[in-house]
Amino acid sequence: MKRLQLDFHRNPSVVPWLGLLLTVIGIVAVLWVMTQLDVAKENRNQLEIREDEVALRLRQQEARRLAEQKASPVSGKVAKVTQAQLVQNEIGMGILEEVWRPEIAFTRIDIATVEQDIKLELEAKTLNDVLLLVDRLNAHPAVRNVSLARNAIKSGDPFKPAVASIEFFWKDAKADALKASNVASQVTGATR
């Protein structure tokens, strides 16, 4: 056992190596922890940068996919609508110009280019004028089908005009020519 020193005026002769060693170890541990925190912070920053890059790539891929989906027709109906929009409705309007007479007033015209359909609401001087218009449409070679949806006499008007709704479908000359050429090629192929 070590002797107790009771003389407090005298300097102790023992050097506190243990305390100095523990202090140095504590400082080294604190420095090591601080460097590890900096390394962890840098790793977190790099991970966030990589996550942002991946998210950007995913957004770009999604944008490309949507652009490709818009560019290519998804179904046959979309292709048909696109094709019909390229075809002008000049055929249907030309038919209307040919069959129109001054005693008929078109109050509404709805054109559906995909179905090649025109719906008309009209007023005529008499019901006979409406029926003559239907006959002229039926006689036209470019018209497939005509239907008289409704007809009536406007009773509130002093001139008593006839009002009617007519719908007709026109033929596409290009499609008919293509069908005719296909039929002709099948017939010539069958006769050989």
Image (spheres, helix red, strand yellow):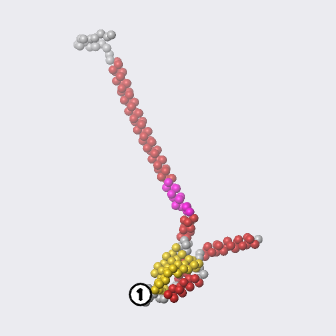
Residue at the location (39% across, 35% down)? 37
Residue 73 colored magenta? yes
Please state which of residues 11 and 155 is positioned toward the viewer in this rendering.
Answer: 155
Expressed as whole percent of the image width and height from the top left, the position of residue 114 reads 54, 71
Mark 1: amino acid: Asp
Is residue 108 visible to the viewer in this orientation of the structure? yes
Label total for image: 1
- Rendered-image quadrant of the N terminus: top left
Indicate left or right for 2 with 130 as reference: left
Residue 90 colored magenta? no
Expressed as whole percent of the image width and height from the top left, the position of residue 122 reads 48, 82
Residue at the location (35% across, 22% down)? 22
The answer to whether residue 172 is above or below residue 66 is below
Residue situated furthest left in the rendering:
9
- The residues colored magenta run 62-75
Magenta stretch mostly in which secondary structure?
A: helix
Residue situated furthest right in the rendering:
192
Expressed as whole percent of the image width and height from the top left, the position of residue 176 reads 63, 75
Residue at the location (51% across, 88% down)? 128
The answer to whether residue 75 is above or below residue 58 is below
Which residue, given by chain and number where applicable, does mark 1 sit on? 157
- Rendered-image quadrant of the C terminus: bottom right
Residue at the location (46% across, 49% down)? 55
Please state which of residues 124 and 46 is positioned toward the viewer in this rendering.
Answer: 124
Expressed as whole percent of the image width and height from the top left, the position of residue 149 reads 51, 79
Badge 1 crowding class, 10 Å Cα cut-off, few under 14, some 14 to 19, many 20 or more, is: few
Q: Secondary structure at mark 1?
A: loop
Is residue 102 visible to the viewer in this orientation of the structure? no
